[in-house]
Amino acid sequence: MEKIQVQGVHHITLVGATRQLSIDFWEGVLGMPFVFEQPNLDNPDESHLYFEPGDGTLITVFTNESRALDATSNPDGIGHLHHLAFNVSRATFQQVAERLQQRGVPHTGAIDRGFMDSIYFRDPLGQRLELACYKFEPPPGVLHSQVLLEAHRLRVAEGAYNIQESHLAAAIEGLIQRTQPSLSTQREARSAYVAPVEEP
C-alpha cells in the first residue's frame, strides 16, 4: 500500500449566492483578483468563478442568480468546515479591524496565537474566515511549516503549553545553522562585548 502524495492545495470551492455578491466580496473586500469564469460543468444552471488569493492557488465559487442571500452562520458540527484562513502582511493585518468596522462587519479583534496573529469574521453567507499574519519570516529556502515543526519540537522539549516567540527564534537559529554553511567552527552564541559601550 502506498500513499497518495499531495503537493499543495489546488483550489477550494464554495457554494455562493449570486455572481455579483461573490465578486463584491472575494475581490472587493479581500482583494483577490477575479481571474477566470466558466459554467459549472456539473450543473449548467450555475457559473463557476475563480479568484486568486495571492499565492497562485485558487478559491472558486459556484453561483446561481436564483439563490437568495442567506447570512446564517455555517454549522460547526463534526465534518463541517470550521474556517478558512488567509495570509496577510503585517501592514494589512494592522488595518483589518478598522476596515471591517467600516463595513459594519463584526469581528473578534486581533488574537495572539503565539506564532501568528489572527482575526476572525464571517463572509456574507455565514462562512467563518480568518486573516492571519505570521510573527516570523523563515530563512531563505526554508518553509514556514519547517520553522513550525522545529519550534514544535523545542516547545515539547521545554514542556510549554504552546509555541512562543522564543521557540520561533530558536528554531530559526537552528535551521540557519543546519542549512547555511559557515567558515566558522564555533557557531554557538558568544559575547563580542569586551569593553562597555555607550548608550545608543
Image (cartoon, helix red, strand yellow):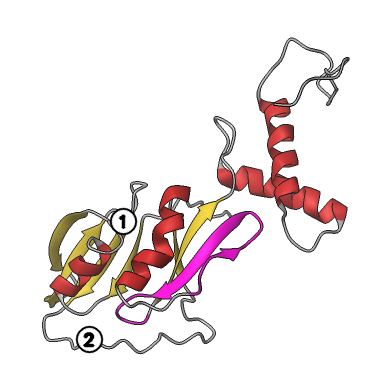
Residue 86 is drawn in which quadrant?
A: bottom left
Residue drawn where x is 31% and y is 56% of the image: 58
Residue 122 rendering spot, x and y as whole percentages: 39, 77
- Circle 1: residue type: Leu
Q: In this view, does 186 lie above or below 2?
A: above
Can I make out residue 63 in this image? yes
Q: Which amino acid does label 2 sit on?
A: Leu
Pointer 1 residue:
58
The quadrant of the rendering that contains the N terminus is bottom right
Seen in the image, is 147 located left or right of residue 195? Answer: left
The residue under the point 49% across, 67% down is: 119
Please name whichever residue, 110 or 65, is drawn nearer the observer in this view of the structure.
110
Which stretch is magenta? 108-126
**Circle 2 or circle 1, nearest the eye:** 2
Q: Is mark 2 on a helix, strand or loop?
A: loop
Q: Is residue 119 magenta?
A: yes
User: Residue 32: x and y, percent?
Assistant: 27, 56
Disc number for residue 69: 2
Per the model, the C-alpha gap separating discs 2 and 1 is 23 Å
In this image, 137 relative to 17: left or right? right
Depth check: 150 or 115 in front? Answer: 115
On the image, which quarter does residue 106 sit in? bottom left
Nearer to me, 135 or 84: 135
First-in-chain label (2 vs 1): 1
